[in-house]
Image (tube, rainbow, N blue to C red):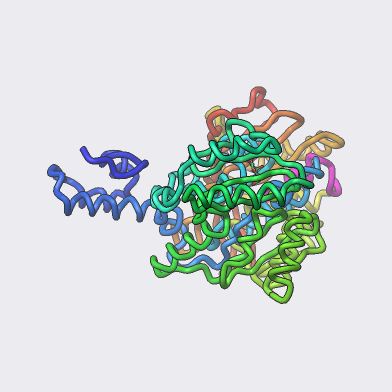
Amino acid sequence: MKSIGLLGTKPAIIQLLKEEERESFEGFEEESERNFQKLRFARLRILIGTIVMDRITKAARLMIVSDLDHTMVDHHDPENMSLLRFNALWESNYRHDSLLVFSTGRSPILYKQLRKEKPMLTPDITIMSVGTEITYGNLMLPDDGWVEILNQKWDRNVVTEETSKFPELTLQAETEQRPHKVSFYVDKTKAQVVMKELSDRLKKRGLDVKIIYSGGMDLDILPQGAGKGQALAYLLKKFKNEGIPPVNTLACGDSGNDAELFSIPDVYGVMVSNAQEELLQWHAENAKDNPNVIHAKERCAAGIIEAIGHFKLGSNSSPRDIADFVECKVDHVNPGYEVVKFYLFYERWRRGDTDNCETYISSLKASCDPSAIIVFPSGAEKTLHECIHTMKVQYGDQKGKQFRVWVDRVLSTPIGSSTWLVKFDKWELAGDERCCCVITAKIDAKGSGASDGYTWTNVQQKWLEGYEKKDDSTWLF
Ligand code: GLC
Ligand code: MG
């Protein structure tokens, strides 16, 4: 059987199709050219389609393409405050109609490691290894089309052969050496000379490569057509071909390998306040007069939020910046916002970050139907009102400790004129333990408009494999 790219064979693809699409492949026995093309096309649609068509039937309102280290993730903030603020903003206001793209220099191995260490959201698309690997969705399905493009005028062996002649270059870890990326460390003082000489030598050998210097120490060698900017251009073209180019795109970065992101047409850009010298220098030389690229005043994810406000790309008010939800009425709420708000309040209550007052408890009770049931991962059941009683006495039990709650992949599907099924991952970090529940909640709009608030009518929880809580006796919501 012919293999349809990296995703595999016919059965693998058919399994990923929607029910109604699957039918059209029934009785699909012969491997005729026509059927083969049909499958290839289906696969392409899955790549973009699983993430876009299920969730977004029209163009994304905002596509954020962000670097991770020192941009989305602040390694100097052990509390991860700006990241958590961004997460709350994204899940409450953007997840339902926008696209989150992470673009990192890290290989898939180091990227997955970072996701375990930091409270990061699940992106719709992941661009790794400095724009040489693109994957889609939570399953991280690879884009083989991109791989084919990168094979042009690229020969890894020639690169390793030529670079071995430079004693100034120290090879990076094995995990960071990828099919279309060879990476070294080189001292700041030697970088420019080495890059020039290396580039000349590789040209003589018939290769067309791109050499990028980042973070004042990393040197990456990639095919000329690769890089974070080219990968973004490729994605934008794909969306355009599908007839759904994002309404706005915001690129975010801090170091040399992010520079390309800021020269892609029709893209807003933010260099976070803590951007590296090499990026600021690139900006001064190449994009100084471009009003669509700013150097933020704020660090990391806070700088991204600042840019959303600066370019007026949508709401830039994170629910984490709202001290009192009872006092503050928010416009344009949606079920996603309700979920973020609920779990944020839960975190604050247990941390003792809010007042221990009856008003909050009554307000929380009012947002849950008195007969609403919650089914825990163990299968045990309680009413939500019983849970609120339990929660009441847990006030401040996490004070002074590491305790954070955040939600990811919040997806709401209307199942009636004023009812939604909301599916999301609820993460809880307590001390060193991190656990996660996949939750499906049924939420009703209270009155005629969303401004009247929501009522939770049912909650079902399941552990996310690998993230079960060891002692679940204090597990709530
Ligand atoms: C990440 C990668 C590394 C690369 C650097 C700059 O740190 O792990 O291989 O050199 O980004 O692109
Ligand atoms: Mg970075």
Q: Main secondary structure of the magenta part?
A: helix
> Could one spot residue 428 in this view of the protein?
no
Q: Position of residue 170 (x, y in %)?
A: 68, 34
Q: Quadrant of residue 117?
A: top right
Where does residue 141 sit, x and y in percent of width and height?
Answer: 43, 44
Residue 308 position (above or below residue 253): below
Vertical comparison of 374 with 40: above or below: above
Residue 38 location (% of width, % of height): 23, 54
Q: Quadrant of residue 346?
A: top right
| Residue 445 visible | yes
Q: Which residue range is magenta in the image?
A: 342-356
Q: Quadrant of the C terminus?
A: top right
| Residue 355 sits inside the magenta stretch | yes
| Residue 88 is one of the magenta-drawn residues | no
Figure quadrant, ligand 1? top right
The N terminus, quarter of image = top left
The quadrant holding residue 393 is: top right
Residue at 78% across, 58% down: 321
Choose between 329 and 291: the one closer to the eye: 291
In this view, the residue in front, 109 or 347, is 109
Q: Judge by depth and name the residue closer to the eye, 399 or 101.
A: 101
In this rendered view, identify the residue nearer to me: 329 or 304.
304
